[in-house]
Image: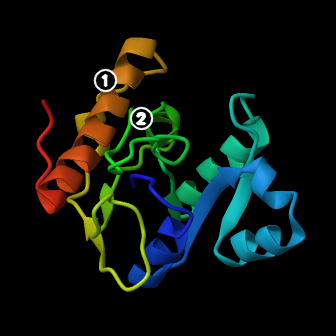
């Protein structure tokens, strides 16, 4: 899913009938209140940029047992003032490749002048069609293949977001 606001996790949890387990940056777990919240929402910490193998193994285990792993491929909230999704990182593609799982793209859009979450303004959660593992075409961990698969995932999410918002990329 694209990542615009801290509330994204709660929206996904509320719109999905099954438990979603989320990777969340380790720093969020340093605050006891936030740590409690994220753990109860199915979150677990990952040290970003450090190749956190324990968190990646937990993610793979979640997928292998048939549970839902929630990932924000951008790796952080978008910096775009209008909320336009950013470039995806490799995590979702790598985990999909290593587990043979498909990817279900999702786009969140917050109605408002700036695309950010506002109280008393509608929020939209849109799930796309499953991207089967064959379409991601990753044979190993070849960087070009991983980048292509990451672009496929994030491109689908971005297209869904643009369709929902009426935004057109140039």
The tag on residue 148 is: 1
Instruction: Give SS at disc 1.
Output: helix
Front one among 153 and 63: 153
Q: Which residue is rendered at x = 31% and y = 23% of the image?
A: 148
Residues under labels 1 and 2: Cα distance? 10 Å
- Which of the marked residues, 1 or 2, is nearer the chain's N terminus? 2
The tag on residue 156 is: none
The tag on residue 88 is: 2
Q: Residues within 10 Å of mark 1 (few under 14, many from 20)?
A: some
Task: Count every numbered label the image shows and give the total.
Answer: 2
Q: Is residue 25 left or right of residue 159?
A: right
Q: Position of residue 33 (x, y in %)?
A: 83, 74
Q: Which residue is rendered at x = 11% and y = 42% of the image?
A: 168
In the rendered image, the vertical position of residue 94 relative to residue 109, given as above or below? above
Q: Quadrant of the N terminus?
A: bottom left
Quarter residue 19 falls in: bottom right
Can residue 67 be seen here?
A: no
Q: Position of residue 138 (x, y in %)?
A: 36, 26
Q: Position of residue 108 (x, y in %)?
A: 33, 63
Give the label, 1 or 2, closer to the camera: 2
Q: Residues within 10 Å of mark 2 (few under 14, many from 20)?
A: many
Q: Position of residue 26 (x, y in %)?
A: 78, 49
Q: Is residue 150 left or right of residue 169?
A: right
In the rendered image, the vertical position of residue 39 relative to residue 99, given as above or below? below
Q: Quadrant of the C terminus?
A: top left
């Amino acid at each position: 899913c694209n990542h615009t606001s801290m509330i994204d996790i709660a929206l996904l949890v509320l719109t999905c009938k099954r438990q979603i387990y989320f990777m969340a940056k380790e720093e969020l777990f340093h605050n006891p209140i936030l740590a409690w919240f994220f753990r109860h929402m199915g979150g677990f910490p990952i040290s970003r940029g450090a190749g956190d193998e324990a968190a990646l193994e937990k993610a793979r285990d979640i997928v292998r047992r048939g549970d839902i792993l929630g990932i924000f491929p951008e790796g952080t909230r978008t910096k775009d003032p209008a909320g336009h999704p950013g470039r995806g990182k490799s995590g979702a593609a790598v985990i999909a490749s290593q587990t043979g799982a498909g990817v279900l793209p999702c786009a969140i859009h917050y109605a408002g002048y700036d695309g950010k979450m506002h109280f008393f303004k509608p929020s939209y959660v849109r799930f796309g069609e499953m991207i089967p593992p064959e379409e991601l075409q990753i044979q190993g961990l070849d960087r070009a293949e991983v980048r292509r698969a990451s672009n496929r995932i994030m491109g689908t999410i971005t297209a869904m977001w643009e369709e929902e918002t009426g935004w057109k990329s140039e």
